[in-house]
Image (cartoon, rainbow, N blue to C red):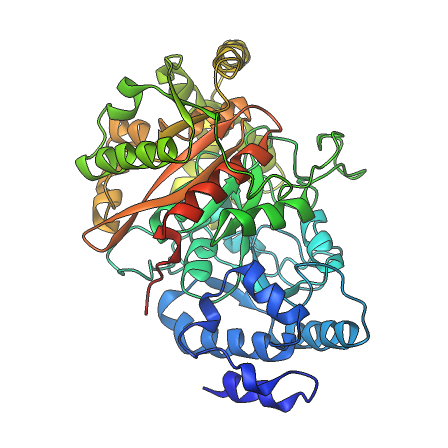
Amino acid sequence: MQHLRNFSELSFYDSSKHIGESVIHYLDLTELAARIRSREISPVAATRGQLDRIAALDGTLRSYALVMGDPAMAQAEAAEKEIKAGSYRGPLHGVPLAVKDLCDTAGFITAGGMAIHQNRIPAEDATVVRRLQEAGAVLLGKLQLTEGAYSDHHPCIEPPRNPWHAEHWPGMSSSGSGVATAAGLCYGSLGSDTGGSIRFPCAANGLTGLKPSWGRVSRHGVLDLAPSLDHVGPMARSAVDAGVLLGVIAGADANDPTASLDPVPDYLAAVGQGIRGLRIGIDAAFNCDGVGFATETMLADVAETFRALGARMVDVRLPDVTQAVADWFPLCAVEAAVAHAASYPARKDEYGPVLASVVDAGLSVSGVDLQRILLRRMNLRGRMAEVFCKVDVLLIPVHPFDSPTVEAMQALAETPSLVSALLRCTAPFDMTGHPAITLPGGFTAGMPLAFQLVAAHMNEATLVRAGAAFQGATTWHRRHPLD
């Protein structure tokens, strides 16, 4: 392929250290960064390679909403010059990344998966995009998502396809980010999670995804679905990569008063120090309730791996989340109705049926019912906080289904009890705002399985440390599709 030949075009890179064609696009972000810094790999060649691969594969995978080829090459060339001159900005410098297409990009369309935004060109970058670019990252383009980041694609959009098997579910709204990162079409990406949409695509595509605490990452310039539930975070190939990305995008933002003022820690500071004594909470009844056999077996194996690493398993009982999941739907709907007030119902005929029904539902919720939801949400936060007085992290499933197919998930959408089952392990932690990391933990019938760890507010560093320890002892995250 041409991108490999391009390694020899730049004299200050060592052409004797070429990386195998079947490997380079699956390097971890931090592995690529180290080779860029040592001048073993050129940012220009790495970017050309990604663009070549997108051109070859994404016509089938459909993960990109917009490929920004010329600007990406210009950014790669600028990064190369800076690195050559000794001005190295850090581990994202020259690394090709992509962002979910609800993050504003100045001068380039941000559609949010919506027909009404197909010509929307923002004047400035979202804060997270600006921070990636200030760190020297190369922005390959914008990744496809469901309409307005809810649960279904607009009828005019072809959904992304799982690179492990096209008949299997690629995850929820950040599916483009999951597919592109898993398939080697970027070295990491940004997604968003309102009810599970970082964690579901990472589980489905064999990735590591980190939903930060609510407020840890600025939402300025990111299209809203439900602002008090929305979390922007990294989707990557390892916990270390996720920690690097989060360290760049996190932090206070004058443009977003809801962004936390807490200092951003070095998320990699404790990586490699082990997890001996780490208290991992397990609610056996919660973890087995309606969970598929392969997922249940995987969770037991994961717990054994953590025990072998020196962690201590602690029996806990989680608060009943049934009401919280039920409350998630009307709360999300009310906030979506507010977010779409400028275009709905004025342009209702341009909305897809699923998002339109959500906004309609939100418009019908009474103020009294909303207040009841908000009070129950406050109580849930308090009960969850009590759990984290006893443990450092929780070990739970991402969802109960063993590698579901697209067909099964379409049928599931018509059964409210199954939709609630899908959200049982994810939506409560969007309601409470706790951080969670999703990690590959096994395979079933050739498809990835995953679990998640949840931590106390603003304790993402523990999630990165625990995730890195697990991945240091296992190789599930080293498996890739399309090999």
Residue 457, picture quadrant: top right
Residue 402 as seen in the image, left or right of residue 28: left
Location of residue 84 by image quarter: bottom right
Q: In terms of depth relative to the viewer, which is nearer, 136 or 71?
A: 136
Is residue 345 something one can see in this rendering? no
Q: In which quarter of the image is the C terminus?
A: bottom left
Report the number of discs: 0
User: What residue do we see at 55% from left, 52% from top?
Assistant: 241
Q: Quadrant of the N terminus?
A: bottom left
Residue at the image point whose x is 58% and y is 54% from the top: 117
Please state which of residues 93 and 251 is positioned toward the viewer in this rendering: 93
From the top left corner, tell me how far across and down residue 314 is, in percent.
39, 18
Instruction: Reply above or below: 280 against 70.
Output: above
Instruction: Tell whether 365 sits left or right of 253.
Output: left
Identify which residue is drawn at 43% across, 19% down: 327
Q: In the image, residue 429 lies at what x, y percent?
A: 48, 26
Residue 99 in sight in this render: yes
- Picture coordinates of residue 312, whole percent (x, y): 41, 23
